[in-house]
Amino acid sequence: MAGRNDSKDGKEKQTRIDISTAMRKAAGQLTELLQREPGSVSALKATDDGWTADVEVTEIEKIPDTTSVMASYRVSLDGRGRLVGYERIRRYSRGQVDR
């Protein structure tokens, strides 16, 4: 089959995307699901199966801005950058400082 990389056992060889592409894909695919723009990607880690990223999102905008409700989502991507799962791992006020 043209355009396919085969390994010795006949399975398709998966090429891992680079770190900057993983960051963009994690934020972009979460945006599509939540219909909210992410504020930042606060963590990105390579795994055996692909990537995990922690993405910060404003869930409830308030005035003043420091009282807005933020959420951190853990996004899982396969090696090609396709979303395979996500979960909200934390909610906090924007002005809250971690200790």
Image (cartoon, grey):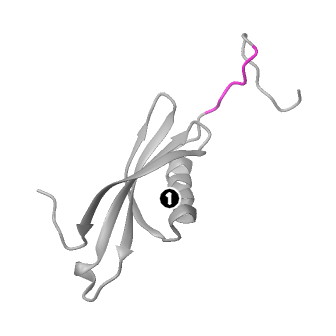
State the image coordinates of residue 89 (x, y, percent, origin top left). Answer: 32, 52
**Which residue in the protein does label 1 denote?**
27
Location of residue 4 with respect to 43 vertically, above or below: above
State the image coordinates of residue 44 (x, y, percent, origin top left). Answer: 40, 46
Q: Kindly report the secondary structure that dominates the magenta region of the rendered protein.
A: loop
Location of residue 2 with respect to 21 vertically, above or below: above
Q: In this view, does 50 lie to the left or right of 12?
A: left
Q: Which residue is drawn at 73% across and 10% down?
A: 8
Helix or strand or loop: what does disc 1 sit on? helix
Quadrant including the C terminus: bottom left
Task: Tell whether position 11 is magenta.
Answer: yes
State the image coordinates of residue 91 (x, y, percent, origin top left). Answer: 28, 63
Residue 5 image-quadrant placement: top right
Q: Residue furthest right?
A: 2
Q: Looking at numbered disc 1 in the image, what kind of residue is underneath it? A: Ala
Q: What stretch is highlighted in magenta?
A: 10-15
Q: Residue at x 48, y 70 (%)?
A: 37
Residue 80 image-quadrant placement: top right
Total marks placed? 1
Task: Tell whether position 5 is magenta.
Answer: no
